[in-house]
Amino acid sequence: MKKSSVIFLLMLPLVVFSQDISKERIVNIVSTLASDEMKGRKFGTQENDRAAEYIASEFKKNSLDYCFGDSYLVPFEYKGKKGYNVCAIKKGKSQQSLAYSAHFDHIGTNNKEGDNIYNGADDDASGVATVIGLADYFKDKKTDFSMVFMAFNAEEIGLVGSKALSENQNLNPVFNNIKAIFNFEMLATESQFGKNAVFMTGDEFSDFDELINASAVNGLKVYPDPYVGKQLFYRSDNVNFVKKKIIAHSISTVDMNKAMHYHAVNDDINIVDADNLTNIINNFAKTIEKLNTKNFQPKYNDKVKYDF
C-alpha cells in the first residue's frame, strides 16, 4: 500500500470527528458571554453591546450572510436606550429556511457585597452557544434548507428585542421563508428526563416535536413541556414569531423544580454540564442535517392562539 494511502486512511477518523463541535469550543463561548467582564449583559450597557459584537464576530467567522444591509447587528431603541439584535443567514438549496435563536442579554449586577454579577451562563449563554455551535457545524455544508441565525436582546425586560426584530420590515423577506424556529432557552443543566434530553414548550400546538423525534440521532429526545401550567410557550421570544404564524417553539433542559440558579449570581460557568450541552448541540446538528423540505414541514393545529 502506498504511504499516501496509509496517511489518508489514518486521517479518516479525524475527518469524521472534526464534524463535531468540541466541548472546549462550547465552554469557550459560554465562558466569554458569562464572564465577570460582561457584567451580566444587561440591556443598555456597554457590556451588552460587547456581547452583541462578539456574537457578530462569531457569525463572521462562519462566513454567514447579513440578514439585510451591511451588518449582522440590527439596531433598535427602547425607552431611550439603543441596543442590537444579531441576525445572519446561510443559504441552502431552497429559499425555505429553518431558524435558530436564543437571547444573549441577562439581568446585570446588584449592589450587594461579594459576588454581585448575574453571569447568566445557563440563561442564556447556553442557548447562544447552541446557535453559534450550529453555525460552526454547518459552515462548510450545503443543506436543503437555508438557515437563519438570530440572537435576541432585551428578553429579560419583556421580550423586547425579539419583538423589535420580528416587526422590522426590512426582514420580511427573511421571515416569509422561515418554516420553523428552534428557540434555545437554558440548556446548561441536565433535564428532568435525563441526559441528551430536552423539552419543548407548546408541544400541544404543533407536530414540531414529533417530526424532530422521527429524525433524531444518537438517542436525542424531545419531550413534551412538563410545565404546561406556566404557559412558557407564550412567555419566551418564540411568541413574537408565533404572532406572525411562524412555527416557533422554545427548547430547554431546565428543571424548574431544582433550578436554584435561575436569576441568581451562581448561574455561572460552574453550573454548566458541558458534556451534556455539547452532546445535545451535536445531536441537534446531526438531526437537523437529516431534515429537508419534504420530510420537515411542521404545522400548527387549531389549539394555538395567534392574538394575545
Image: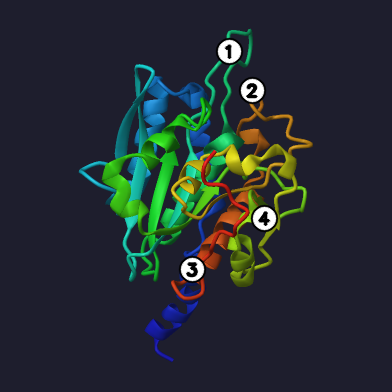
Asked if labels 4 and 2 touch by Cβ distance under 8 angstroms, the answer is: no
Q: How many marks?
A: 4
Asked if labels 3 and 2 touch by Cβ distance under 8 angstroms, the answer is: no
* Residue 184 horizontal/vertical position (percent): 55, 47
Mark 3, mark 4: which one is toward the viewer? 4
In three-dimensional space, the C-alpha distance between marks 3 and 4, rounded to whole angstroms, equals 25 Å
Instruction: Identify residue type, mark 1.
Output: Asn
Q: How is the image coloured?
A: rainbow
The label shown at residue 265 is 2
In three-dimensional space, the C-alpha distance between marks 2 and 4, rounded to whole angstroms, equals 34 Å
Local secondary structure at mark 2: loop
Instruction: Identify residue type, mark 2.
Output: Val
Instruction: Identify residue type, mark 4.
Output: Glu
Horizontal relation, residue 182 to residue 267: left or right: left
* Residue 158 horizontal/vertical position (percent): 52, 28
Label 4: which residue? 204
Can the viewer see residue 39 in this picture? Answer: yes
In three-dimensional space, the C-alpha distance between marks 2 and 1, rounded to whole angstroms, equals 9 Å
Q: Nearer the viewer, residue 212 or 110?
A: 212
Mark 2, mark 4: which one is toward the viewer? 4
The residue depicted at 41 percent of the width and 62 percent of the height is 138
Asked if labels 3 and 1 touch by Cβ distance under 8 angstroms, the answer is: no
Q: Nearer the viewer, residue 36 or 108?
A: 108
Local secondary structure at mark 4: helix
Asked if labels 1 and 2 touch by Cβ distance under 8 angstroms, the answer is: yes
Local secondary structure at mark 1: loop
Label 1: which residue? 110
* Label 1 or label 4, whichever comes before in sequence order: 1
Horizontal relation, residue 265 to residue 259: left or right: left
The residue depicted at 37 percent of the width and 29 percent of the height is 50
Label 3: which residue? 289
